[in-house]
Amino acid sequence: MRVLVTGAAGMIGRKLIARLKAEGQLAGRAIEALDLHDIVPADCVSSPAIHMSIHVGDLADPGEAERLLADRPDIVFHLAGVVSGEAEADFDKGYRVNLDGTRRLFDAIRLIDGYAPRVVFSSSIAVFGAPFPEIIPDEFHPTPMTSYGTQKLIGEALLADYTRRGFFDGVGIRLPTINVRPGKPNKAASSFFSSIIREPLAGREAVLPVPRNVLHTHASPRSAVGFLVHAAGLDGAAIGPRRNLTMPGVAVTVGEQIEALERVAGNNVTALIREEPDETVWAIVRNWPTRFAATRARALGFTAEDSFDAIIRAHIEDELGG
Amino acid sequence: MRVLVTGAAGMIGRKLIARLKAEGQLAGRAIEALDLHDIVPADCVSSPAIHMSIHVGDLADPGEAERLLADRPDIVFHLAGVVSGEAEADFDKGYRVNLDGTRRLFDAIRLIDGYAPRVVFSSSIAVFGAPFPEIIPDEFHPTPMTSYGTQKLIGEALLADYTRRGFFDGVGIRLPTINVRPGKPNKAASSFFSSIIREPLAGREAVLPVPRNVLHTHASPRSAVGFLVHAAGLDGAAIGPRRNLTMPGVAVTVGEQIEALERVAGNNVTALIREEPDETVWAIVRNWPTRFAATRARALGFTAEDSFDAIIRAHIEDELGG
């Protein structure tokens, strides 16, 4: 079996590829070839059993998607995209990459006769916008409050229609906030959710810009990769026509995140968290969704951590050598 | 004030233009000019007070939207589109007209500096797909089951984001089934909703292909025009960020439609309805939405008929000379 990953150089892409190479199989079939696409070359440690191809280019460019599909991958993971902050700062780039790039990929698949691969599309809870009920049900309407969320919503709509038409067999998965993100703090408003865990564990100070009662839903990078792998093997008939699924996660307050960190690593670690309220950050974060039912995803077998302690331990095992 | 109408040659477009010309004003301001656009020339009875311009072309063609906006209309009614059956039969045409045409119009507005007109977009309850709750709330998620519904949903998402960005001031209105449609019966699955009223009133037989307990929501063409005119004058701040509104209507069963016809026109008229069950039609119609809360639209002052009798009387007054 051949597998294509777009956005292969991104954080989730790299972790997905590592898992596919380690397991050597997907959806019950051996992986013979991996096509890795991004705008920069994806890291590629060669594997004895799997043929790896590195593709560099922009999916929104004419002909790029067609070239990428030349070998008819059986499963397509479409992870490529400009992130939320960049899509908000650069309107044209966000629509070009996140909408036009996605549509070109989907259309290139559509126009190949007799070809209908499984397509797994990484969407986001950014498709939802405030105000919210206490628990957001699967049937809640998406009213994004960012251009990124709008572009993801349009990708979901295309995926569902192209699937209904039989052009491919799509599954859209709405990722919650991924925590703990490896790397450095960045200027994203959500950065603190990870940095208040990651930085103290590395012996560095972290700033908490919002009140401790802010509630949010999290899943580890390991769970995000698990969602993608699980989606690749799902029976399309069992999913039905509603192809975009809100993923499960752990809903905790920031205070509960910190309590979990103290349980896992002690209060000398949590002492490195400095509360420094930032009205600008809070104004953004207070409009974010809090808690999801994720009823359908759970029924279809998607699983996430059952506590924030488990999310911290996954980070320690996967990033800090256990 | 200058007003642009796309889809000006369509049924709703023609009725909207007739009302604008009759009233001579919109949103409290006198109309000085009307720009009428469609792929065929719109009917144009000249008016002493209003300058009329007829534009013929395809909004999806590069440059077309830019030409249409040369005189910076203050209010844009974007009604143009390929209908449901055609968008389903011709995939490329549906996406080109309903998605690319809409996006080109929105982008042409966006790219004019210091210009942010009110844009009223005619969407449809086709953005919704079964299964439904008994009453569909404003917060119900859109999961279209046609390419037309998908294209309307994408138009709604773009409208909301372009409005949030300040490129224009948009209102999307989701029209229920328009009844009684003038003209002839056609092959649309929804055709019978109108023809069981229109044809007997004209002394002709009509076929009812579904059971009498089928429930559906209707508004007259007169109400549809009323929605558009009301949307043009709404205060954007009062609407808030959720710019796409499900319109009110009259939810009745087919049996109640027929009882209303008997009250208005007598049983010699309803005797012309012949029940001839058609499984194919029913299989389509049973997946259509039935009853909407339309809470927000009603609170914002949108009104429809309060009974199906009133819908029939509107048809008799507007199409049959009273």
Image (cartoon, coloured by chain):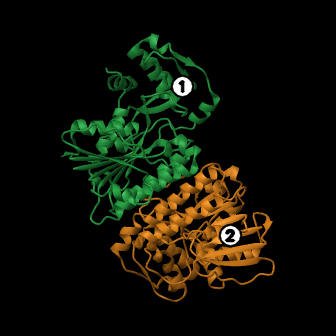
Chain colours: A orange, B green
**For residue B14, side relative to residue A106 (left or right):** left
Which of the two residues, A298 or A274, is positioned nearer the viewer here?
A298
The residue under label 2 is A4
Q: Which percent across, then down, holds residue A283?
A: 36, 68
User: Is B84 placed above or below A20 here?
Assistant: above
Which chain letter goes with mark 2?
A
In this view, the residue in front, B70 or B272, is: B70
| Residue A7 image offset from top left, x and y in percent | 60, 73
Residue A284 sits above or below residue B141 on the image: below
Q: Amino acid at mark 2?
A: Leu
- Residue B295, picture quadrant: top left
Q: Does the CB distance between marks 2 and 1 fall below 8 Å?
A: no
Q: Are marks 2 and 1 on the same chain?
A: no
B72 up-or-down from A262: above or below: above
Q: Quick one: label 1, few (<14), some, or many (20+) residues within 10 Å?
A: few
Query: What's the residue at 49%, 26% (across, down)?
Result: B253
Front residue of this view, candidates A29 and B120: B120
Q: Amino acid at mark 1?
A: Asn
Report in which chain the residue with disc 1 lies.
B
Query: Label 1: which residue?
Result: B213
Residue found 77% across the figure and 81% down from its top: A47
Q: Quadrant of the N terminus of chain A?
A: bottom right
Q: Secondary structure at mark 1?
A: loop
Residue A140 visible somewhere in the drawing? no
Query: Can you tell which of label 2 and label 1 is closer to the viewer?
Result: 2
Rounded to the nearest angstrom, the CA distance separating label 2 from label 1 is: 50 Å
Tell me the quarter of the picture where residue A293 sits: bottom right
Residue most toward the top? B268
Residue B89: image quadrant is: top right
Mark 2 closeness class: few <14, some 14–19, many ≥20 residues within 10 Å: many
Label 2 residue SS: strand
Q: Is residue B196 left or right of residue A161?
A: left
